[in-house]
Image (cartoon, coloured by chain):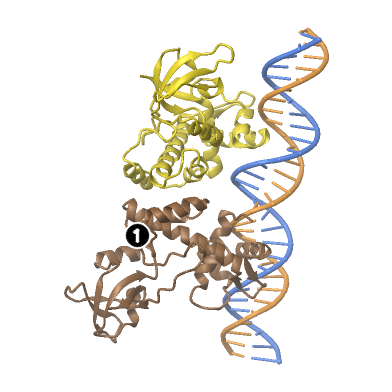
Chain colours: A yellow, B brown, C blue, D orange
Amino acid sequence: MSTSFAEENYLKIIYRLSEGHDEDISTNAVAELTQTKAASVTDMLRKLAEKGWVNYQKYQGVRLSPAGEKIALGIVRKHRLWEVFLVEKMGFNWDEVHEIAEQLEHIESDSLIDKLDEFLEFPKTDPHGDPIPTKNGVMPELGYLHLSDIKADKRCVLMGVAKDSAIFLQLLTKMQLSLGATLHVLEVNAFDRSISVSIDNAPAVFISHEVAKNILVKLA
Amino acid sequence: MSTSFAEENYLKIIYRLSEGHDEDISTNAVAELTQTKAASVTDMLRKLAEKGWVNYQKYQGVRLSPAGEKIALGIVRKHRLWEVFLVEKMGFNWDEVHEIAEQLEHIESDSLIDKLDEFLEFPKTDPHGDPIPTKNGVMPELGYLHLSDIKADKRCVLMGVAKDSAIFLQLLTKMQLSLGATLHVLEVNAFDRSISVSIDNAPAVFISHEVAKNILVKLA
DNA sequence: AATATTTTTTAGTTGGGCCTAAAAAATAAA
DNA sequence: TTTATTTTTTAGGCCCAACTAAAAAATATT
């Protein structure tokens, strides 16, 4: 069965909202991310349920069926591979690629994606450190920690971001925070939960809790 | 003003039908290429005329306005650049890229196309020898001849094809006819207008008029 | 010039995906 | 536990881009 542009977007968004927990997703949550109204979401959920891509009971929220998850993972895979292409081959910055990848993720050609994957030398993560689902629909678990959870005196490496809005990414760039940076957490400031961090051994700077929450690291 | 997927397809098809002559395009001709019915075309032509992209008077046929031509050339430019990408970078054959490029041509991002153009080292033609419109909307005139018009004893070089259906292209490949091949027309056979041609100095083979008509060459 | 044929347009529908407004269900507060 | 609030669904419409069937215009034929 073939999927429309709109259907693919819904499945992708339900997937995103489901990551990391096991509760059903509310109609309103979907409406917010799809930039539509709750009534429109209800319509679409009924259709998706009919096609067997979600489990949906009215007033009970929604979750992806195995078939729906497979489609969603395919879209995420395409999105992230295209992002790698845009940054690595086309010279875009990591804050510029999201909107373009939102379009490219709907291009339908399995052989194109296979060839793109090979051309990019089988990347494991996208430019924001997010894992790229495998061809057979498995999302690798990378198990990164949030910088906001790192204790004082620990050292770690910046592996990814938990948010890819352009203004957030631009701020990181301004602060010299890019993938692979080594971070030495010197102090956690109780007052505002900001942290003092030495980035790549430079003199320490403050990082707000809000920012630290959205930075993913692994301990060095 | 922004253009929908469907509108872009209509403009592209009207452009294609207009190339090389100065008559208005009939509703039926458009219907055939868009794979829709004449009634649907009439609807769309009215809309395109309202937006100022075509000149259309009912029962009189249609032609692109300067604004419409500019949009059409932009689509064709994207289509052909993506085809170069698919063949040169992704390793597709020239008969495999049309459908994928039909999708990619609607991706909206000027900076992406600029970067793609640069990445491909500013190609002048696509994998079928068709000229790529410039960024400012000019279609280069290459002035090739049809192989069917070449006189006996002349030598020429295969520069392009006038049709890009997969079965035609696959036949050419089977016959060792690819871009850049040198062709020596030995004889024009009056009976069926087939021609005897030596390809890259190999022993002569027959090429039907139907095939020769769709091969573009320049004299050597 | 009158008639037949072909092409094109109009009129009326359809389905996809969205909307607003109102009703119904679920949840929170008194 | 009754009432108020929030969330979700239904009902009814809208716009886009397609469709069929019938009418009208253009073109071809006799």
Q: Is residue A48 left or right of residue A160?
A: right
Residue B36 in sight: no
- B52 w.r.t. A21: above or below: below
Residue C18 vs residue C14, the one in the foreground: C18
Given the image, what chain letter belongs to the residue carrying mark 1?
B
In this picture, residue A57 sits left or right of residue A102: right
Q: Quadrant of the C terminus of chain B?
A: bottom left
Left or right? Give the position of A187 relative to B155: right
Q: Secondary structure at mark 1?
A: loop
| Residue on which the image places disc 1 | B95
Task: Please tell me whether residue A42 is drawn above or below residue A205 in the rendered image.
Answer: below
Residue drawn at (64%, 37%) of the image: A36
Q: Can residue B28 be seen in the rendering of this structure? A: yes
Expressed as whole percent of the image width and height from the top left, the position of residue A208 reads 55, 21
Q: How many marks?
A: 1
Where's residue A105, x and y in %?
A: 47, 43
Q: Residue at x 30, y 76 (%)?
A: B208
Residue A131 at x, y = what percent?
40, 31
**Mark 1: which amino acid?**
Asp
Question: Quick one: B69 or A209, which is closer to the camera?
Answer: A209
The location of residue A154, given as percent across then percent down, is 41, 14
Q: Quadrant of the N terminus of chain B?
A: bottom right
* Callout 1 crowding tier (Cα within 10 Å): few <14, some 14–19, many ≥20: many
Tell me the quarter of the picture where residue B178 sits.
Answer: bottom left
Q: Is residue B57 above or below residue A203?
A: below
Relative side of D6 to A98, left or right: right
Q: Nearer the viewer, residue A154 or B99?
A: A154
Q: Nearer the viewer, residue B36 or B22?
A: B22
Q: Can you name the residue that lies furthest to the front here?
A: A203
